[in-house]
Image (tube, rainbow, N blue to C red):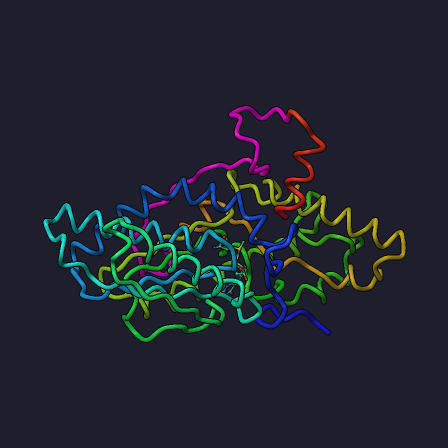
């Protein structure tokens, strides 16, 4: 049966050793990088609109601690900003809408929300008393999710590299190619297949912008953080390298008879890591948003905090990166 993202895609469920919950440190590190941008965006939205209820949507929230880290950060920023504005007792209410695909482990997420609410209820902190309401929203962000002009701030962390489907028409094009074990762009991949990956990104991202434009209030903001590549050359980039390693692992499973060859040959990762130039071109073409772009790099081993590119313990780092993948 062909893969359907909306039905089949989800991060590893539960809170066991290989779960997403226990293996989302790299996303947590990305969150640290965007904190100043988040602070600025929330302050700007709040100051210009002064809403009684501020509506914040996290798109692709998954079922790990990061989404609650984001919720907590947003509450803290709003509480602090109200104090700065001299409105310590006139807080807005905050509505958080946590969105992901229907296959997401919402049960695990709701348990984390429960723990989060309990710990805030016990806290003596002023900001913990800020009235906030959290709910889950299953559905693809490549469809309409919210009423017109109803959301003040969209946030999405480590999600928009996911496509709505494997590149359209890819299986027909693959039939004409020699190398059938690729699952993502590789150095030897035919340009016609690479182009299909690029076109799928253009189609998905333009649609995403159109949909969010309708849902965002006038003067609202979006903070979108996703995996891209540093250079324009589509054959470069760490995603190519990492998914190439994943393809090799799958191929070795085929060689050992653990996976059917036809299954590997009928699979492509529904992902694409664009360059800054590609992102800018689509946003400009849409004519819907003004934009600031910030590029930052993270080590693929989230437990490697050194500044250098030298790997101290390659076995340990290999395990960390594999778990993250
Ligand atoms: C790597 S996780 C990031 C989760 C979370 N934001 C974090 O930082 O820990 C990517 C999430 O995007 C979700 N996702 C992918 N495509 C989606 C779509 N079309 N609509 C909604 N969520 C999607 C996946 O299900 C997954 O939970």
> What secondary structure is the magenta-colored segment mainly?
loop
Residue 232 lies, with reference to residue 199, above or below; the image says above
Image quadrant in which you'd find residue 149: bottom left
Left or right of 71 on screen, residue 139: right
Q: Furthest residue to the left?
A: 86
Left or right of 237 on screen, residue 49: left
Residue plotted at (88% across, 52% down) = 255
Residue 130 lies, with reference to residue 141, above or below; the image says above
Residue 271 lies, with reference to residue 295, above or below; the image says below
Image quadrant in which you'd find residue 16: bottom right
Image quadrant in which you'd find residue 294: top left
Taking the magenta stretch, the answer to whether it contains residue 309 is yes
Labels in figure, total: 0
Residue 263 lies, with reference to residue 276, above or below; the image says below
Left or right of 122 on screen, residue 162: right
Residue bounds of the magenta highlight: 282-311
Residue 91 in the image, given as x and y percentages of width and height: 18, 58
Residue 296 in the image, given as x and y percentages of width and height: 45, 38
For the N terminus, the image quarter is bottom right
Residue plotted at (63% across, 48% down) = 325
Residue 38 in the image, given as x and y percentages of width and height: 32, 48
Residue closest to the eye, 92 or 164: 92
Residue closest to the eye, 52 or 160: 52
Residue closest to the eye, 8 or 199: 8
Residue plotted at (56% across, 55% down) = 198
Taking the magenta stretch, the answer to whether it contains residue 237 is no
Residue 270 in the image, given as x and y percentages of width and height: 61, 60
């Amino acid at each position: 049966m062909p893969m359907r993202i909306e039905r089949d895609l989800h991060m590893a469920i539960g809170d066991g050793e290989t779960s997403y919950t226990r293996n989302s440190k790299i996303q947590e590190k990305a969150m640290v990088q965007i904190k100043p941008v988040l602070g600025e965006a929330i302050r700007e939205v709040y100051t210009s609109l002064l809403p009684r209820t501020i509506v914040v949507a996290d798109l692709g929230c998954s079922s790990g601690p990061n989404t609650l880290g984001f919720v907590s950060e947003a509450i803290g920023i709003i509480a602090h900003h109200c104090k700065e504005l001299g409105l310590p007792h006139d807080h807005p209410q905050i509505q958080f809408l946590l969105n992901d695909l229907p296959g997401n482990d919402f049960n695990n997420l709701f348990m984390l929300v429960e723990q989060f609410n309990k710990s805030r209820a016990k806290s003596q902190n002023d900001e913990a008393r800020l009235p906030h309401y959290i709910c889950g929203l299953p559905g693809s962000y490549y469809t309409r999710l919210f009423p017109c002009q109803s959301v003040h701030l969209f946030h999405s962390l480590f999600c928009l590299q996911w496509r709505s489907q494997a590149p359209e028409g890819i299986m027909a094009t693959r039939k004409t190619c020699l190398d059938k074990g690729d699952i993502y762009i590789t150095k030897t991949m035919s340009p016609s297949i690479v182009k299909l990956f690029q076109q799928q990104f253009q189609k998905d991202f333009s649609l995403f912008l159109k949909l969010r434009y309708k849902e965002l209030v006038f003067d609202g903001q979006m903070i979108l953080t996703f995996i891209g590549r540093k250079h324009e050359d589509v054959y470069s980039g760490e995603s190519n390298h990492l998914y190439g390693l994943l393809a090799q692992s799958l191929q070795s499973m085929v060689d050992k008879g653990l996976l059917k060859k036809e299954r590997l040959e009928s699979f492509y990762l529904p992902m694409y890591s664009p360059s800054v130039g590609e992102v800018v071109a689509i946003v400009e073409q849409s004519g819907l948003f003004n934009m600031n772009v910030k590029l930052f790099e993270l080590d693929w081993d989230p437990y490697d905090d050194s500044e250098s590119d030298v790997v101290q313990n390659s076995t340990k780092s290999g395990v960390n990166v594999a778990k993250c993948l």
